[in-house]
Image (cartoon, grey):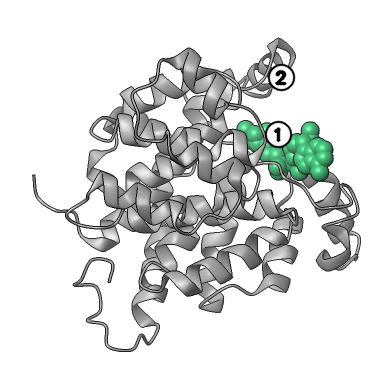
């Protein structure tokens, strides 16, 4: 199997995130949420429509590329402008972005809905582009992913979920890939027991019922981010199998699919994604363009002692 180029991995990650989101979206939540999603899709049959997960990741990728890094004020403004309630945002994030759109500073808005900040998985779901951009400097990755996460998810668990998925996308770029090293690399950078303890189980063979019970499959950061990592490790050779597994788990299917898809794409590159599904993906070209722009921005950033684009993670 030829090793995909780093650029193809950037593209694979963003497209994998969007595909995972759109394949999971019809199954997210209960019957009411599912019926609403179906109704919104009338007239768009055959198109794989994505949700807030992809919307926010796309905005993040573009902002990172243009600003050559995390510019929190720019990110807050762009996320607020892009807010589209038809994409199924989490209730806290929807309100918070509405407040920013109304002129409130994100530093106040991020504790206006939940006083300690949100620990939903809304930061984790969009984090893969941060992992791509900062993969050569994991200290910068942790710092910048925490900052980008805190704009909407100021709770330590919401932030750690965002950092974890960014790290997973970064470490998935490693070639050759070593599962034990991957999991150890994640664990050593996670402080919260809710996440650290779950990571111990990430590579273990668990039944779907055990995954639901011990890792979770809900909307909270610590009850979904490690689940996505587990799903990736289990099905890292077959994207559709991976997504079938996510749908079988149930719960927050679009988001677990998006997180796992972003990691899978970074690991395997765009050529490992299913062509038939990609052909039906909403705004596929736009997503691909954003990923290539992110790559070019990454390539153009000075990094001490690095041979641009030629080496796996240091
Ligand atoms: O995290 P968030 O953006 O939601 C993302 C989810 C994904 O599944 C998307 O696909 C979309 O469907 O929504 O939105 P938040 O509202 O910040 O967090 C999600 C939920 O977590 C909240 O609505 C609460 O139910 C819960 N939650 C909290 N509950 C109590 N106290 C998050 N933070 C808190 C908290 O501090
Ligand atoms: Mg969503
Ligand atoms: Mg979701």
Quarter of the rendered structure image containing ligand 1: top right
Q: Could you tell me which secondary element the residue under label 2 belongs to?
A: helix
Q: Position of residue 256 (x, y in %)?
A: 52, 33
Front residue of 289/118: it is 118
Q: Which residue is mark 2?
A: 33
Rendered view: 176 above or below 145 = above
Q: Which residue is mark 1?
A: 88
- Among the 4 quarters of the image, the one containing residue 254: top right
Residue at 42% x, 33% y: name it. 201
- Among the 4 quarters of the image, the one containing residue 7: bottom left
Q: Is mark 1 within 8 Å of ligand 1?
A: yes
Residue at 23% x, 33% y: name it. 237
Residue at 37% x, 87% y: name it. 302
Rendered view: 293 above or below 217 = below
Q: Quadrant of the N terminus?
A: top left
Q: Position of residue 242 (x, y in %)?
A: 36, 27
Q: Quadrant of the C terminus?
A: bottom left
Rendered view: 112 above or below 250 = below
Q: Position of residue 261 (x, y in %)?
A: 41, 39
Res. 76 visible in picture: yes
Q: Are marks 1 and 2 in contact (CB under 8 Å)?
A: yes
């Amino acid at each position: 199997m030829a090793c995909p180029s780093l650029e193809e991995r950037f593209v694979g990650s963003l497209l994998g995130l969007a595909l995972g989101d759109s394949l999971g979206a019809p199954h997210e939540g209960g019957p009411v949420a599912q019926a609403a999603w179906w109704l919104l899709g009338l007239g768009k049959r055959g198109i794989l429509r994505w949700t807030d997960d992809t919307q926010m990741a796309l905005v993040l990728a573009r902002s990172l590329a243009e600003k050559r890094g995390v510019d929190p004020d720019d990110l807050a403004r762009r996320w607020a402008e892009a807010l589209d309630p038809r994409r199924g945002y989490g209730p806290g994030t929807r309100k918070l972005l509405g407040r920013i759109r109304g002129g409130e500073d994100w530093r106040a808005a991020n504790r206006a809905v939940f006083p300690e900040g949100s620990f939903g998985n809304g930061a984790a779901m969009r984090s893969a582009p941060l992992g791509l951009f900062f993969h050569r400097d994991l200290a910068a990755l942790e710092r910048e992913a925490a900052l980008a996460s805190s704009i909407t998810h100021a709770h330590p668990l919401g932030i750690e979920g965002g950092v974890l998925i960014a790290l997973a996308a970064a470490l998935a770029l490693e070639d050759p890939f070593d599962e034990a090293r991957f999991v150890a690399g994640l664990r050593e950078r996670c402080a919260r027991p809710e996440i650290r303890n779950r990571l111990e189980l990430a590579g273990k063979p668990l039944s779907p019922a055990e995954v639901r019970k011990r890792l979770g499959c809900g909307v909270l950061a610590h009850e979904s981010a490690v689940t996505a990592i587990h799903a990736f490790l289990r099905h890292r050779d077959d994207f559709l199998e991976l997504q079938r597994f996510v749908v079988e788990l149930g719960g927050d299917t679009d988001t677990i699919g998006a997180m796992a898809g972003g990691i899978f794409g970074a690991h395997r590159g765009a050529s490992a994604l299913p062509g038939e599904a990609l052909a039906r993906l909403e705004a596929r070209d736009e997503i691909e363009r954003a990923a290539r722009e992110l790559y070019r921005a990454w390539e153009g950033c000075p990094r001490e002692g690095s041979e641009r684009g030629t080496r796996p993670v240091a």
